[in-house]
Amino acid sequence: MHLSPEFGLTYKEISLEGFSEVEKVEILLSSDTPEGIFKAMVLGMISFAEVYQRLKPNLINGLLVTSRQSNEAEIN
């Protein structure tokens, strides 16, 4: 919604607050039905996976490894 003219292109306000732009991910579908919302969520997940693959952010890698290690410790 932040990238949509319909909602005022609010990504510009986020930039003014000092957040740096890494990448814009468009996931908006013009539907508020349960099906439309679910489709938008799926598009977002696919798009975020593509961004993750391109950028390979260290913070997320660290969180995933730590989370996996915690889960394995709880199982054992």
Image (cartoon, rainbow, N blue to C red):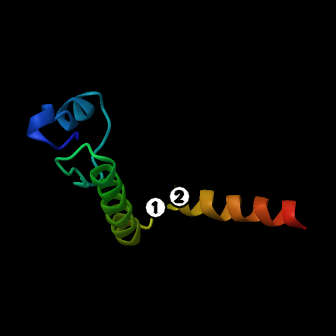
Query: What residue is drawn where x is 66% and y is 65%?
Result: 65
Q: Amino acid at mark 2?
A: Ile
- Percent position of residue 53, x then y: 39, 72
Q: Position of residue 16 (x, y in %)?
A: 22, 29
- Residue at the left extreme? 5
Image quadrant in which you'd find residue 5 = top left
Residue 31 vertical position relative to residue 76 in the rendered view, above or below: above
Residue 62 horizontal/vertical position (percent)? 61, 60
- What is the secondary structure assignment of the residue under circle 1? loop
Q: Which residue is mark 2?
A: 60
Label 1 with label 2: CB-CB less than 8 Å? yes
Quarter in which the C terminus is drawn: bottom right
Name the residue at 31% across, 64% down: 47
Q: Is residue 57 left or right of residue 34?
A: right
Residue on which disc 1 sits: 57
Would you say 46 lies left or right of 58 here? left
For the residue carrying disc 1, how many other residues have a C-alpha within 10 Å: few (<14), some (14-19), or many (20+)? few
- For residue 5, side relative to residue 75 (left or right): left
Looking at the picture, which amino acid does disc 1 mark? Answer: Pro
Q: Nearer the viewer, residue 29 or 65?
A: 29
